[in-house]
Image (spheres, rainbow, N blue to C red):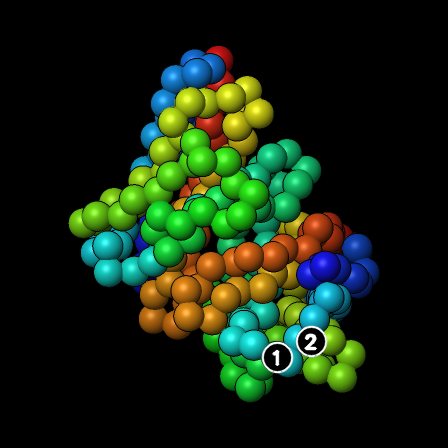
């Protein structure tokens, strides 16, 4: 079965860029999506179709997908960005989520 | 405004069947190219996709749960439902319903989630 691998945790200082990766076999051939989840809340869509932002999502969030790796980038991290982040793709009629990355803003 | 809301028992006994309903409001569940999914999240863990149903009634399920899962759609009530049989403590989780955009396969709307505990 298809798997997506994310680092369990990433730490960043306020105002600095943060990068979260998502690895999967030939991921570039699939659309990657990204979600943010804060404690006690439902996930929120951040990025879809590899690099598109829904309305209302700040421009500091961006995405890319090349080779086997999808990447979520936060250009200037805010305290409010501290959350869990999940990538998601689709393979053989099944939805797959990455294991999630906890972003800590120090 | 589009909204999804889960409902159902918060406590289920082991070996019984978990049943949840998701009510969609703000548009017709039968219109557009959307899939209607169930996703769960055990406490402190990641997201696990359970399965989905299309407006045509066709379904796809997570292979690891397929033998125990049934998802159905009731367009007259603007609802879709989840049944998970033979539950164990490992099925204790927050259960979310979500809408998946057909062609691009991302989840644009999520319910608030409902905690289901499996315990005697």
**Residue A1 pos. (x, y %):** 32, 62
Category of crowding for the residue at label 1, using alpha-carbon neighbours closer than 10 angstroms: few (below 14), some (14–19), many (at least 20): few
Identify the disc placed on residue B52.
none
* Along the line of sight, the residue nearer the viewer: B92 or A2: A2
Q: Work out whether A50 lies above or below B99.
A: above
| Residue holding disc 2 | B28
Marks 2/1 in contact by CB < 8 Å: the verdict is: yes
**Residue A44 in view:** yes
Image side of residue A70 versus residue B79, left or right: left
Question: How far from the left and from the top, in percent, is residue A39?
Answer: 64, 34
Badge number at residue B31: 1
Instruction: Check the residue under mark 1 and report the chain it is in.
Output: B
Q: Please say if B119 is above or below B25.
A: above
Element type at mark 2 = loop
Q: What's the residue at 36%, 23% (across, down)?
A: A17
Going by the picture, which residue comes out furthest to the left? A67
């Amino acid at each position: 079965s298809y798997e997506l691998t994310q680092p369990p945790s990433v730490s960043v200082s306020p105002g600095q860029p943060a990068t979260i990766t998502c690895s999967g076999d030939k991921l570039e051939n699939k659309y990657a999506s990204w979600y943010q989840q804060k404690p006690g809340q439902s996930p929120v869509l951040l990025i879809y179709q590899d690099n598109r932002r829904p309305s209302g999502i700040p421009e500091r969030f961006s995405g890319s997908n090349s080779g086997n790796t999808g990447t979520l980038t936060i250009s200037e991290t805010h305290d409010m960005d501290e959350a869990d982040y999940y990538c998601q793709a689709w393979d053989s009629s099944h939805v797959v989520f990455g294991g999630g990355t906890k972003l800590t803003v120090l | 405004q589009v909204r999804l809301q889960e409902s159902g028992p918060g406590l289920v006994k082991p070996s019984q069947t978990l049943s949840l309903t998701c009510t969609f409001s703000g548009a017709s569940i039968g219109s557009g190219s959307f899939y209607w999914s169930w996703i769960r999240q055990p406490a402190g863990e990641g997201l696990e996709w359970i399965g989905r149903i299309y407006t045509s009634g066709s379904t796809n399920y997570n292979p690891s749960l397929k033998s125990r899962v049934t998802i159905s759609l009731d367009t007259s009530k603007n609802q879709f439902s989840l049944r998970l049989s033979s539950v164990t403590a490992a099925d204790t989780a927050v259960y979310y319903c979500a809408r998946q955009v057909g062609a691009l396969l991302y989840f644009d709307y999520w319910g608030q989630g409902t905690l289901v505990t499996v315990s005697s």
